[in-house]
Image: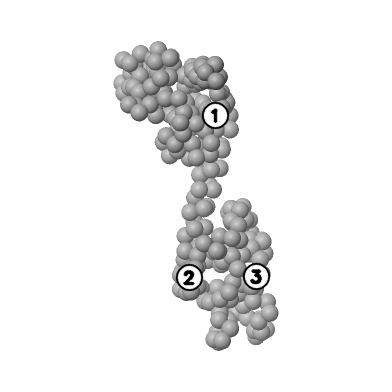
Amino acid sequence: MNVIMPAEAPLELFKCAYVVMREKNMRLSNLVIAYPQKGFQVSATDICLGMMGIDRQEGTGKNYEALSDVMQGFRCQSRYAFLTHLPTQLLMCYREVDKTVLAIKLFDAFDAFRRNFDDQFSLTDKIRERHTFTEGGYRTICADSKEAFLTPEDRIALFKTGYQYIAFASDNTVGVQKTVHRHCPSLTEFAKFAKLDPEIWFTHRFGHLVITKNSRTPNLSALELCELLQDFLRQKKSVADAAE
């Protein structure tokens, strides 16, 4: 079985090929690029993409013209819904004469987008019932569930989506982390404002993280720490407003 698609295929057909080849566990060697000046054969088991106007023997090769048709045919709409979010302009990012090489690069991009897409939905589930605050123009989330705590990778992903501070709890560890990309008030200042006991709390020297020390029982919950952070940011804004 092969997947056959025209050499000048739009991104829609590359998406179709991706779905078919992932569903059938096919290799790139099963992808056949049809050029106008070269002959090719189509067997009864082959799947053609975007080739409705090409003469073929009756009963040879099933043809799909759109991604929606492929997903409906394979009953996999939910698994590949992320492809509908990829703009057609994505194809303009690649200038490959060899269409097989182009397919490889596009499939890698689809895989990466799928991972990021899945990660984002996973984060949404984790933060759905968490407390979110906006104080002093800074967006803060308190992820205080020990059953579904946020990993460092989760926190980095949340910073990319617009949070500046994250208060979190993990096992016996409680802390606040701030994004390193913005000029936000330092957590070193926050630790002084909140009068956090240095015997219990550790502050990163650049003020990006304040966290309970190993083997120390935190004397504040993540939510309590987050509420202190809101007071701190509110005070910082008041001082800045007064200075203006």
- Residue pointed to by mark 1: 139
Q: Nearer the viewer, mark 3 or mark 2?
A: 2
Residue nearest the viewer, comparing 101 with 145: 101
- Compared to residue 178, the image places residue 36 above or below, namely below
12 sits to left or right of 96: right
147 sits to left or right of 131: left
Residue depicted at x 58% and y 33%: 128
Q: Which mark is residue 96?
A: 2
Q: Quadrant of the C terminus?
A: top right
Question: Which label's residue is closer to the chain start, 3 or 2?
Answer: 3
Residue nearest the viewer, comparing 35 with 76: 35
User: Do the residues under discs 3 and 2 have CB atoms within 8 angstroms?
Assistant: no
For marks 1 and 3, give the CA distance.
Answer: 46 Å
Q: Secondary structure at mark 3?
A: strand
Residue nearest the viewer, comparing 49 with 233: 233
Residue nearest the viewer, comparing 90 with 225: 90
Q: Secondary structure at mark 2?
A: loop
Residue depicted at x 49% and y 31%: 164
**Amino acid, disc 2:** Glu
Residue 41 appears anywhere in the view: no
Q: Nearer the viewer, mark 1 or mark 3?
A: 1
**Amino acid, disc 1:** Arg
